[in-house]
Image: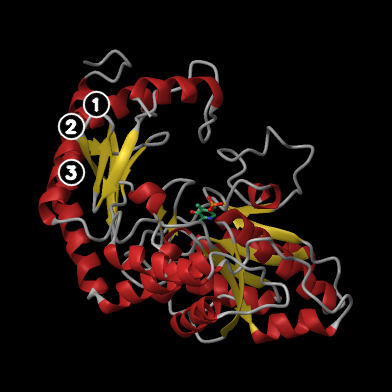
Amino acid sequence: MQEDRLLELDARHAWHPYSATRHPDPVYPVRRAQGCRLELTDGRQLIDGMASWWCVIHGYNHPRLNAAAQAQLQDMAHVMFGGLTHAPAMGLVERLVRLTPAPLQRVFLSDSGSVAVEIALKMAMQYWQARGTPDKVRFLALRRGYHGDTFHAMSVCDPVTGMHRLFSGALPQQLFAPAPTPGFDQGCTEAQIADMQQLLDAHHQQLAAVILEPIVQGAGGMRFYSPEYLTRVRALCDHYQVLLIADEIATGFGRTGRLFACEHAGISPDIMTLGKALTGGYLTSAATLTTETVADTIASAEPGVFMHGPTFMGNPLACAIANASIDLLLDSDWAANIQRIETGLRAGLAPCRELSGVAEVRVLGAIGVVEMEQPVAMREIQRHFVAQGVWIRPFGRLVYLMPPFVITDAELEHLCAAMLSVLHAWGSNPSPAVA
Ligand SMILES: *Cc1c(COP(=O)(O)O)cnc(C)c1O
């Protein structure tokens, strides 16, 4: 398809994420992608700093993932998971149980992160119902959290930056603790956990679970917090008889320097959600893991089953690719590689601290964040990044890098240099008219 035809169809009929159909932001037509490069239809190559919303950890067009997809297509692309089972799905549940913290033994496969969160919330509610405490239906979440765009997932997203106001009549009313204040390298004092403790103390009889993103709050603010905070939340949940749901959809599979972010704190949740990098960014797929205790309790009471079953759950093609992606990760020296990226991001982004308009620069694992004092105009800043040969898509005040793990040192330097140069120009003239 010709580029002008493609753009015309897009303008007339397509609807992009979080976008307006009237005066939409420009979109860039991609022809193909290889390794860490996106190739636009006009031949320009962009180094990808986003890993396509953090999921393409092995880069694009990877021979081993392609081979896994092609091999699976010879057998079956899809069969229903109701009443049937198959090797790709069992390979995946085996891997996930082996890799995640010990008591997580049951895997419910689904098709996207938001759905995995819905399933987690539903599991927690059905668990307490089965325990004879049907009043425990509410959730306690963190401010600045993000858990997805479906209705119950929305209800546990940050109440200010999330979509609460827009859907206020329709969303269940949840409870929110302040975003954690101690940084990743800090401990956590009694005072810093006091709000969480008070909320649990006051409301535990109505609470099914605490839901949080462990260590890294992603799309709600790109904030890193103290592992000790997480350890304390785990202890409080036990004390007050409230389940803990760890949403590892953004952090799972090595992004923070540990395979799962819960490992920084040495804790295990009662329920864990996985998505994003699960298939190396090839296909949409997600998983909700829980303990045998939760699963068995749900089975012990009316209606005796867990009430969920997406059409595409356990999709063999997605599972086969997920298995190959996990093997690829584990076959590599991934921890040293994340350390390499962290070192590169620290060195490359440090000079941004000196720029006017920059509030903070922070790095953890393969995540590098420059937080600005003011929101950036995406349409304009995106154009400047593309002109520098990089794909970086900020949101609000956050300009960040979450590159594929296969990024080379030279590519990483290019990404950081582009950040520095664009933000330098931006800081000295933050109007949308900046040249
Ligand atoms: C992206 C994300 C989700 C939602 O996943 P989708 O696949 O976009 O539905 C949920 N939780 C966290 C922490 C995420 O980063």
Q: Residue 42 at x, y = what percent?
A: 24, 28
| Mark number displayed over residue 416 | 3
Query: Which residue is situated farthest in the front direction here?
Result: 74
Q: Could you say whether the residue bearing mark 1 is in a helix, strand or loop?
A: helix
Nearest the viewer among 423 and 181 is 423
Q: Could you say whether the residue bearing mark 2 is in a helix, strand or loop?
A: loop
Task: Specify the quadrant that holds the C terminus.
Answer: top left
Q: Is residue 407 left or right of residue 61?
A: left
The residue identified by callout 1 is 384
Tell me if residue 229 can be seen: no
Tell me if residue 296 can be seen: yes
Mark 2 Cα shell of 10 Å, populated few (<14), some (14-19), many (≥20): some
Q: Is residue 185 left or right of residue 396?
A: left
Q: Of circles 3 and 1, which is in front?
A: 1
The residue identified by callout 2 is 388
| Mark number displayed over residue 296 | none
Q: Earlier in the sequence, mark 3 or mark 1?
A: 1
Residue at 57% in and 56% down = 112
Say what amino acid the circle numbered 1 marks.
Answer: His
Residues under labels 3 and 1: Cα distance? Answer: 14 Å
Residue 65's place in the image compared with 390, above or below, is below
Q: Is residue 126 left or right of residue 66?
A: right
